[in-house]
Amino acid sequence: MDETTFDLAVIGSGPAGQKGAIAAAKMGKRVAVIDKNDMIGGVCLHAGTIPSKTLRLAVLYLTGFQQKSFYGQAYAPMSHVTVDDLMFRVRTVIEREHAQVTDQLQRNGVTLVNGWARFVDAHTLQTDDGLQIRGEHILIACGTRSARSPEIPYDGYRIMLAEDLGRGDRKEIPRSMIVVGAGVIGLEYASMLSALGVRVTIIERRPTMLDFVDREIIEALSYHMRRRDAIFRLGETVTGVSVQENGLVRADLESGKRVTGDALLYTVGRQSNADQLAIENIGIETDARGRIAVNENFQTAQPHIYAVGDCIGFPALASTSMEQGRLASTHMFDGPALRPAPFFPYGIYTIPEISMVGRTEQALTAERVPYEVGKAHYEDVSKAQMVGDRAGMLKLIFDPDSLKLLSVHAVGEEATEIIHIGHAVIALGGTIEYFRDNVFNYPTFAEAYKVAAYDGFNKIAEMR
């Protein structure tokens, strides 16, 4: 095997590509990862998950958001927060993670090839500097970018995509912001901006938000954002965007309304980067958003070419992408037979954060599955009182006869952390008796499981 021929050639070094490459390398395979040196770690590290979640923590810290319930609304560690103050923490984390990912790939013997890959044929990739790499197997993990609308005059300063935040010449945080799109990304950024004191208007063409999330959890999120003066314009379609003579951005709505703000953030969906791979050369088709169809083993129409991560669509999470990369490599090299878990946790890093595992009340009702609910409000949990979060809630949905735990939904501090306790119980087929009969450290957020379980038992007792 020559220096440019590999058992596996991976396109993209984000979570899916990283874990797929390392899994193959640990099976003794010769692996190359093709990506630009300054993008090692992928969009996840440089413009997506890592920077946005780090930005969220910076917002909470610099504004003293959680401490205001104790020390008053005027309390803040910094009297004036700038874009540079927020991005200092983001840049530091990105630099450290970039070094860690690079080191991890190299320690596992993975060859890093600088550049962007395009298909020459079904086994050959060519980088933008003309280097050709041959792979017996190929793993497409090219990620996504923000979808654009041809009607929106983006300038990266007043009219932005998610990856424009923190870039450019803007030093001051806008006083008002229009956010077009109430998906995960739009709501995450809208909630951060509202926590900074920015007057946020969220415009969404659908009448509801995040339909895969429990309605009660979404209502709680909406309530807390409205308390920070966020405005929701649901069921509204943007027909035009322009910059006015006074520098304000104006969004015209189909209903005739006009919304103005210092800036506009467009967050309506993602576009797969597969359209940049010359994928048409190998007979693999994509949908309108560039997403690649795969089977249960992540194989494309070409059986030796696999695709994983955001470029194949839902759920498009860093966590699930990592597992997809591992599963694809295991399948292509006849490793131990593995299958994705039937349920995975979903975390949305809004303020307050929300998380879930399992089906919602709406889904269970539609499927005619009987259930009961046990709840714990954070105001009844000592740890929540200590950190200043009295608004959170943990919700257990379970079978009223067998007591088997069906799903868990949470909103509030540490929601994305404590969800894994419920996740484990569901995966092991457990019941809410586990929470009743076991000891939890005190004081912790995990104690909410015991409170919610007792609430569930009380409801069962009332029914009988």
Image (tube, helix red, strand yellow):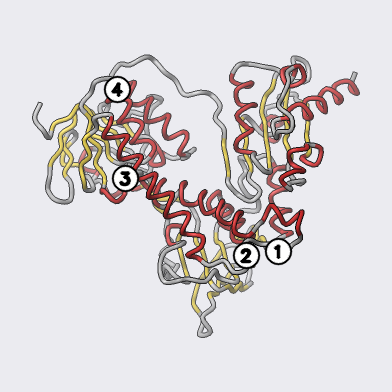
Mark 4 or mark 2: name the one nearer the start of the chain. Answer: 4
Percent x, y for residue 114?
Answer: 21, 46
The answer to whether the residues at label 3 and label 2 have Cβ atoms under 8 Å apart is no
Percent x, y for residue 76?
Answer: 66, 62
Q: Nearer the viewer, mark 3 or mark 2?
A: 3
Q: Secondary structure at mark 4?
A: helix
Q: Nearer the viewer, mark 1 or mark 3?
A: 3
Q: Nearer the viewer, mark 4 or mark 2?
A: 4
Q: Secondary structure at mark 2?
A: strand
Q: Residue at x 59, y 69 (%)?
A: 80
Mark 1 or mark 3: name the one nearer the start of the chain. Answer: 3
Which of the numbered marks, if any, corresponds to residue 26? 4
Residue type, mark 4 in image: Lys
Q: Secondary structure at mark 3?
A: loop
Mark 3 or mark 4: name the one nearer the start of the chain. Answer: 4
Mark 3 or mark 2: name the one nearer the start of the chain. Answer: 3
Q: Quadrant of the N terminus?
A: top left
Mark 1 or mark 2: name the one nearer the start of the chain. Answer: 2
Which of the numbered marks, if any, corresponds to residue 200? 2
The answer to whether the residues at label 4 and label 2 have Cβ atoms under 8 Å apart is no
